[in-house]
Amino acid sequence: MPAVLHTVLTVIFALDCVLLIIVVLMQQGKEAGLGSLAGGNMSDTFWSRNKGRSAEGNLKKFTRIFAVIFFVLAVLLNIPTA
């Protein structure tokens, strides 16, 4: 792999790492809170049905995208050059 391409991919990889960390830290935890004490079922609430269109759904989608980019760039940057 040429040196310029390796440098560009390394910079993109570093930016992706920072963005992935930020997106993961912005997500809320998965604890059920006080609703689990009463045995409440949260699967049929309005928010849970429309989670994909909410900010939390967008963060989850961006996490997947940045994670795929992370793994692809990690593999590409570790291909040995002869």
Image: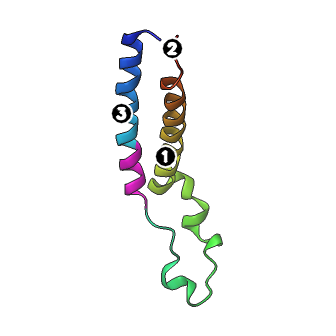
Is residue 25 magenta-colored? yes
* Residue 13 relative to residue 44: left or right: left
Identify residue for label 1: 63
Q: Position of residue 15 (x, y in %)?
A: 35, 34
**Most prominent secondary structure in the magenta stretch?**
helix
Separation of marks 1 and 2 at Cα, in angstroms? 30 Å
Q: Of marks 1 and 2, which one's residue comes earlier in the chain? A: 1
Q: Position of residue 66 (x, y in %)?
A: 48, 39
Which kind of residue does numbered mark 2 sit on? Thr
Separation of marks 2 and 3 at Cα, in angstroms? 21 Å
Mark 3 Cα-neighbour bin, 10 Å: few <14, some 14–19, many ≥20: some
Above or below, comparing residue 2 to residue 25 in the picture: above
Identify residue for label 2: 81
- Where are the magenta residues, as a range? 20-27
Which kind of residue does numbered mark 3 sit on? Ala
Q: Position of residue 53 (x, y in %)?
A: 53, 52
